[in-house]
Amino acid sequence: MKVLRVKPWTIAAFVGPGLLLYVCLVFVPILVSVYNGMFDWNGIGASEWAGFANFHKMLFNDKVFWPAVNHTLQMAILSLVIQLPVALFVAILISRHVRRANFLVTSYFLPVILSVVVIGQLWKTILNPASQGGMINQILDKIGLHAWTHSWLTEPKYAMYSIILVGLWQYLGYHVLIQFTGIQNIPADIYEAARIDGADGFKADRYITVPMIVPIFKISVVLSFIGSLQSFDRILVMTAGGPAHATEVLASHMYYQSFLSLKYGYGSAIACFLVVFSLAATVVVNLVFNQLEKRYT
């Protein structure tokens, strides 16, 4: 077998521009945010050195910050617990029972490519009170369940769960596509051999499908968890963080502090926390799935 030998400077010539662009677009903004987080600055005028005062205020004196962290974690965890198992179940059903699955998978994927503004306005209409044309409440009224009707986006008890429901619906097809692709790459010979040995249906999925798509499932977990931590646009369109900060998340809190309250330094401190939080979550997910891959390999 011949091995292609490439000089180090040739590798650097190809990798260098992309690596430099990545550093400029990712690491430099992170360092700038850390630097700005050390200042009391409104983003326009002169800045004043504040040291770690912004970070101390964020952790100990901000009444909105920790509820926002809690809401962010709720969104991320429920996405993992509900969305990904449902996506895997749907992907298995499609791969097993649908011969020409491309159209069906594409149909599931359509909400992903729609504008978040369109989706937000659509679901705001669906979740409105019955007097304002809310479809869910009108259906509950007609089937005699008026006691179950709520103003889903303006009641603090239900607003966050309504936002999470919309996110689960919107990105379900994204994870169905990822996991369906992983299932399709499993050789059919393995299933045929398992069928001969008496492993079919649920047993085949348990002992073949799930273990063999662990690397693919890891991609869905990382994208779902990190995407939920950084969720902002859906919140902004549907509730703007209300009512009474009941749907405030880290990204929206950072936005309001930076650009509406003109506390750019403090917003940068929140951004730093969000970056560190996302990196820590990614490391934990990688460690867990590395152990799973070793186990099933």
Image (spheres, grey):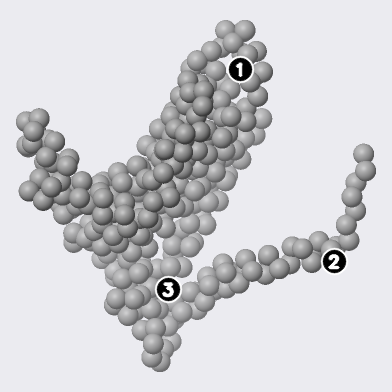
- Numbered circle sitting on residue 274: none
Task: Examine the image and state in which quarter residue 238 appears.
Answer: bottom left
User: Could you tell me which quadrant the N terminus lies in?
Assistant: top right
Residue shown at the point (46%, 38%) measured from the top left: 106
Question: Quick check: can you spot residue 162?
Answer: yes
Residue depicted at 56% across the width and 29% down the height: 183
User: How far separated are the C-alphas under marks 3 and 1?
Assistant: 52 Å
Image mark for residue 191: 1
Residue 156 x, y percent position in the rendering: 18, 53
On screen, 20 above or below 233?
A: below
Q: What is the residue that sits farthest to the bottom in this orientation?
A: 46
121 above or below 93?
A: below
Give the residue type at disc 1: Tyr
Amino acid under label 2?
Answer: Trp
Give the residue number, with chain letter if any, for mark 3.
268
Judge whether 252 appears above or below 264 on screen: above
The residue nearer to you, when weighing 64 against 156, is 156
* Cα gap from disc 3 to disc 2, whole angstroms: 38 Å
Viewer-proximal residue among 128 and 214 = 128
Q: Which residue is mark 2?
A: 9
Give left or right: position of 57 versus 21: left
Quick check: 273 left or right of 137? Answer: right
Task: Determine the image quadrant of residue 9.
Answer: bottom right
Element under disc 2: helix
* First along the sequence among labels 3 and 2: 2
Crowd around label 3: few <14 · some 14–19 · many ≥20 (10 Å): many
